[in-house]
Image: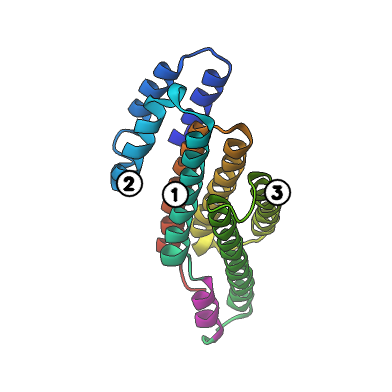
Amino acid sequence: MSTADELKKLKELLDSKVISQGEFDKEKSKLLGNEIADTATSNDVIKNNLDSKSDKKNKSKKWYIIAGILLVFYLIGLSTDSDQPDYSSISSSSSSSSSSSSSSSSSSSTCESWANQSANNASKMADILDSVSINATDASIGVISFSTLESYLETDLRKAKNIYNNQLSLSPNTLNDTSHNYFLDAMEDLIDGIDITILGVQQNDADYIELGVIYIENAGINISLASSTLNDC
């Protein structure tokens, strides 16, 4: 079970009042360990807000939730801009080489098809994340309402799930099985991150926003792994 999944289970226990907020925060800290060291400043702010959560008024809580949303999609932007798997380069590389047999030609064709469609899916996912980032920013400055933000997020979530299902139907060549699976894992984490963020907006719950950040961090790791394990067709 991943850290994000364990945190989600803890959150469910908190919501059902099986554990207290203090117990949740204590167990959360144990689970996170050093995983959020690179975002220490942001998480110090999160911790301070959570420690005094019961004393916060709705207005300050709303501000915190929006700040969390912006952090989520800032992290998404970092991972997709810098580490997005470059499937298009694999496709072009394979198309420039000649096949010595019918079997190798078939394998190359399968790989090219996978690489082309994967590149298309990666581009569509990046477009969705751009949309989400813009809408979250608009909500934070009052250009759109929280209910409108929720509606936009739900639309983007549906699109992301369709892209994921398309990627799931693709068949890479053997050398790219690992990269393909890492990319799917990254998509799953991104989808979960958006889904949990929606829940945080719906319930005015800062814990869910922080949980969404953890899922996005996991997605960034899987995107990097997908990039590092790519092979030419």
Residue 191 placement, left or right of 49: right
What separation in Å lies between label 1 and label 2 (alpha carbons)? Answer: 10 Å
Q: At which x and y percent is residue 41?
A: 30, 44
Q: Is residue 13 magenta?
A: no
Query: Tag 1, which secondary structure?
Result: helix
What separation in Å lies between label 1 and label 3 (alpha carbons)? Answer: 20 Å
Q: At which x and y percent is residue 27?
A: 38, 22
Q: Which residue is mark 1?
A: 71
Nearest the viewer among 78 and 117 is 78
x 52%, y 25%: residue: 11
Q: Are marks 1 and 2 in contact (CB under 8 Å)?
A: yes
Residue interval drawn in magenta: 87-95
Kind of residue at badge 3: Ser
User: How many other residues sit within 10 Å of disc 1, few (<14), some (14-19) or many (≥20)?
Assistant: many
Kind of residue at badge 2: Thr
Nearest the viewer among 27 and 84 is 27
Q: Which mark is residue 151?
A: 3
Nearest the viewer among 46 and 79 is 46
